[in-house]
Image (cartoon, grey):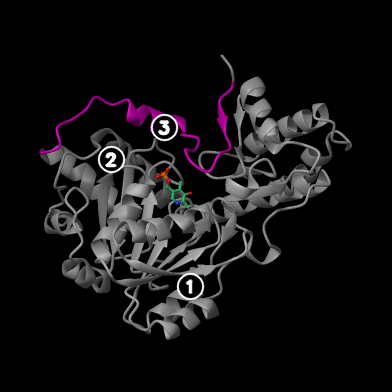
Amino acid sequence: MKRNLLLTPGPTQIPPELCAALGKPIIHHRTPQFQQALKDAITGLKYVYQTTNDIYILAGSGTAGMEAAVCNLLSAGDKAITVEAGKFGERWTELCKAYGADPQVIEVEWGKAVQAEQIKDALKKQPETKAVFITLNETSTAVLTDVKAIGAVVRETNAVLVVDAVSGLGVVDLQTDNWHADVVVAASHKGFMLPPGVAFVSASPKAIKQINASTSPRYYFDLRKAKKVVDKPDTPFTPAIGIIVALVDSVKFFQEKGLENIFHHYARLAEGVRAAARGLGLSIFTDESCLSNVLTAINIPGEIDGTKIVKLMRDTYGISVAGGQAQLKGKIIRIAHMGALDEFDLLTGICCLEKVLKVSGYSFKLGAGVSAAQEIYNK
Ligand SMILES: *Cc1c(COP(=O)(O)O)cnc(C)c1O
């Protein structure tokens, strides 16, 4: 059987313990047994989120959580602020428009991060703004956003701060309460190392007020329904039972290891991958000021097609990395260092990248990437 190594920013590599938990026989959801699982899952999620706010668990991928945030917070005609610094920021704009809201778009050059000052200016220009939508880790560009600085700006206004933390939560620091992130969206198949199928949405008291006031049409994702039963805890509809049962073990892993140690682990993996890229004479796409430890975006020299690199690594060697999206298609590759991975997984990925670059005609000294990463991992 071929290797199946996921160095992708979702879905991520699932550790054997969680694979085993996912194989448990299904239990019924209206039982004390499931209620206990749900309780433990929510308690653990609050630890990872660093929050005392409500967290609602929805069936769906990450975008389901994003849609829930928009349709519950905004009504048609409401003003919002979105940031287009990559593919996922654009999704906030599209969702706002789908519900008839009116987003003021802050455009940011891909590879750079929006600055708190820009959000401040946009809020000044549009004081009636109901919500500011940002992305913790912009997965298309490997940019990390300064949520703390933006939170300090937005909290002074009537707007709520909504953070797409789908790829970043549990991988890099996000202090939901301390940084005043009113609504934070995450999903099972990224930092939580589970299959796709479940989204999480947290809501602060400020957000809940707005959720109750929204007149947008909603049914399945109506967070008022989720709010009514969250303290039991219960869910309004059949939850994704199997994933939630495994989530109990996932969040236990975070609680036992400690967030600080986990962030440090990913930071180290990231440093090694960046060193490997430089060792190979390749530059990093993302601006030095906003590098993310979730994944690394590497520029592929003009004469080589990045899409082919990704395809070769996957189809010939069973190692999945991501290519570039939209205008970056073929120009970058993205190596994720999130999920159940250690340094040897990344060394394997780097080694494979070297092999594939070599056959693609790129000239460098074999082992230069692996050796640069090893230097970091052996520190
Ligand atoms: C993966 C991801 C999402 C959600 O995408 P789905 O395909 O719906 O799971 C949202 N935002 C970011 C930043 C992501 O990386």
Mark whose residue sits in front, 2 or 3: 2
Compare residues 119 and 225 and report the one nearer the observer. Answer: 119
Which residue corresponds to the image point at 38% horizontal and 43% vertical from the top-left?
188
Left or right: where 38 falls relative to 154: left
User: In this picture, which residue range is highlighted in magenta?
Assistant: 3-30
Left or right: where 379 falls relative to 165: right
**Mark 3 = which residue?**
17
Residue 169 part of the magenta-drawn span = no
Which corner quadrant holds the N terminus? top right
Question: Does the residue tagged 1 have its C-beta within 8 Å of any atom of ligand 1?
Answer: no
* Quadrant position of residue 95: bottom left
| Secondary element type, mark 1 | helix
**Mark 2 = which residue?**
244
Compare residues 330 and 364 and report the one nearer the observer. Answer: 330
Disc 3 crowd rating (10 Å Cα; few below 14, some 14-19, many 20+) is few
Q: Position of residue 327 (x, y in %)?
A: 62, 49
**Mark 1 = which residue?**
148
